[in-house]
Image (cartoon, rainbow, N blue to C red):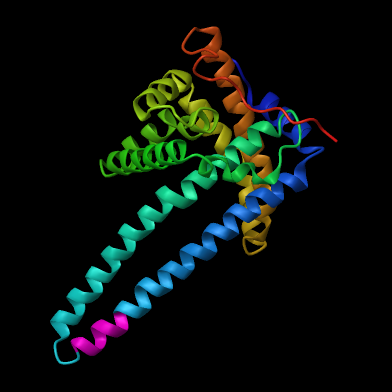
Amino acid sequence: MFWSRKLLKQNAKRVLAGSYWRVFLVWLLITLGVSAVASALSYVLILVPTIFVAFATINSPGAYVAGIILIYLLLIVVMVIFNAFVSSPLSVGGIRYMMESRAGYPPIDTIFSTFRDKAQYLNVAKNMLLLWLEIFGFSLLFIIPGIVRSYQLVYVPYLLAENPYLSYKRAKELSKAMSNGEKMEIFVLQLSFIGWYLLGLLTCGLGLYFLMPYVYATMAELYAASRAKAFALGITGEDELSGFAVYPKR
């Protein structure tokens, strides 16, 4: 194995020593921005159609119930689309920012990098939607297969952050190869933050915002280590994964 939990966390702390508040701001903007828009969409999609259905079916309880079911189905569809075309590309941009933070201070607008080119934006959105659908589909098989699949494909967002034009098939192949034999170790790595998560919950969830930079920085180090393994084993190369931009520290 090319990494250990201790080393990844040490490297993450080293990166955050000079950039913690930058990373904190980036993920706060992404989290709060996505949450605000998603909440607004939810209220509109629930409140407006519900009022309409209530007036239209005032004397038909059965039709009212059917209308409410249709409203919630519409809400689910819209939120899935929103996740694919807005929040997922933003998250991939956030991952790119985190990877570039390992060597310097990238501009905050790096989080919008996937939106700058139509082809790469549509590719990232499509692939992240396919990723979600695949994991969800496997989760329907008594949960465990979905968990296993999520760890097999854990690197897909990172691969797309490095190469936004990568096909979903190839991103899956690379992620499976990079996580091969290490899925349990990745699970334990993520589980090792549970104490911090519990402390964050004790502050009504506010502490979680301050924990996220540490978690994301550690996962960035995990990807860097697994990427190095993939290069060493000849699984991929610079023609496919050309690296991230390097911004000098000021």
Q: Nearer the viewer, residue 243 or 65?
A: 243
Q: Position of residue 37 (x, y in %)?
A: 50, 64
Q: Is residue 166 magenta?
A: no
Q: Give the magenta part as a residue range.
A: 50-57
Q: Main secondary structure of the magenta part?
A: helix
**Quarter of the image where the N terminus is located:** top right
Count the marks. 0
Q: Position of residue 227 (x, y in %)?
A: 56, 19
**Eyeballing the image, is 22 above or below 249?**
below
**Eyeballing the image, is 200 above or below 101?**
below
Q: Residue 170 sits in which quadrant?
A: top left
Q: Is residue 56 magenta?
A: yes
Q: Nearer the viewer, residue 129 or 225?
A: 129
Asked if residue 144 can be seen in this view, the reply is: yes
For image coordinates 37% across by 79% down, the residue present is 47
The single residue placed furthest to the bottom in the displayed view is 59
Task: Answer with left or right where residue 185 lies relative to residue 4.
Answer: left
**Eyeballing the image, is 101 above or below 83?**
above
**Quarter of the image where the C terminus is located:** top right
Q: Nearer the viewer, residue 29 or 194?
A: 29
Q: Residue 175 sits in which quadrant?
A: top left
Asked if residue 181 can be seen in this view, the reply is: no
Task: Answer with left or right where residue 33 lies relative to residue 51.
Answer: right
Q: Position of residue 158 (x, y in %)?
A: 52, 32
Task: Answer with left or right where residue 132 lies relative to residue 186.
Answer: left
Q: Residue 189 sits in which quadrant?
A: top right
For image coordinates 33% across by 64% down, the residue present is 75
Q: Position of residue 220 (x, y in %)?
A: 62, 32
Task: Answer with left or right where residue 63 lies relative to residue 113.
Answer: left
